[in-house]
Image (cartoon, rainbow, N blue to C red):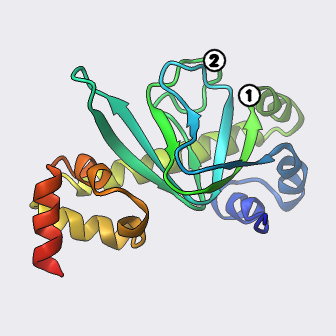
Amino acid sequence: MEAPNRLPEYFQKNTSLSPAEIRQVCPYFKSQELKKGEYFIREGSPVTQLGYLQDGMMRIFTVDEKGDEVVRYFAVSDNFIIDQNGIYPGKPCRMYIQALTGCELRIISSGDIECLEQKIPHFELAIHQIGERTLVKIITVLNILRIGNPTEQYHFLMSQIPDIGLSVPLKDIASFLGITQPSLSRIRKRIS
């Protein structure tokens, strides 16, 4: 069952769009569901859409030269999903974005973004505000995770995403923290 659309509230809190502009923008965002394990986008694919994660959790990862998956960050409900290339249409995605749980998204195509930028003078600014806010959140978490020992980093991650232990495989959490899975298991055992 589709949850109520929280996108208008997100725009109201995080952009300079007026209520009338928000009402004009929201119909361009189409509902899409992803099942656990499905990809929103794969590395190398051109960026053709922007997604708001209404509900669910996703992992954003790369594959290193040895073929190992390296989790860069997690996306949680009530956030936009962007690649490092941001929201620039047509540029190749640098990462994989995959659903860790069933996810409900609101998607807007690059073409609709361009159309709205012509119709609503503030929409381009709103898109940049969304990209900036999303990247600042990612950078803040990544910087905090560089401080302290792995136990402190794990505690911080759990405080930021309390459900992560229930929804995310330990191998992904360990990869994100830059430690081995056995090390993460020892940390979890010590604090339980």
Nearer to us in this view, 120 or 159? 159
Residue 40 sits in which quadrant?
Answer: top right
Measure the C-alpha gap from mark 2 to mark 1: 8 Å
Q: Are marks 2 and 1 in contact (CB under 8 Å)?
A: yes
Residue drawn at (31%, 50%) of the image: 172
Task: Identify which amino acid the numbered label 1 is placed on.
Answer: Ser
Q: Secondary structure at mark 1?
A: helix
Q: Which residue is mark 2?
A: 90
Q: Earlier in the sequence, mark 2 or mark 1?
A: 2
Q: Is residue 161 left or right of residue 154?
A: right
Residue drawn at x 24%, y 57% as measured from the top left: 144
Q: Is residue 21 above or below residue 90?
A: below
Report which quarter residue 49 is drawn in. top right
User: Measured along the vertical axis of the image, is residue 72 above or below residue 21?
Assistant: above
Which amino acid type is marked by label 2? Gly
Quarter of the image for the C terminus: give it.
Answer: bottom left
Residue 153 locus on image (x, y percent)? 20, 62
User: Considering only vertical position in the picture, is 2 above or below 94?
Assistant: below
Give the structural element (helix, strand or loop) at label 2.
loop
Looking at the image, residue 109 sits to the left or right of residue 170; the answer is right
| Residue at 60% across, 32% down | 87
- Across and down, in percent, residue 129 comes to 60, 46
Indicate the quadrant containing the N terminus: top left, top right, bottom left or bottom right. Answer: bottom right
Q: Please name the residue that numbered disc 1 is placed on.
A: 110
Image side of residue 7 versus residue 128, left or right: right
Q: Position of residue 60 (x, y in %)?
A: 43, 41
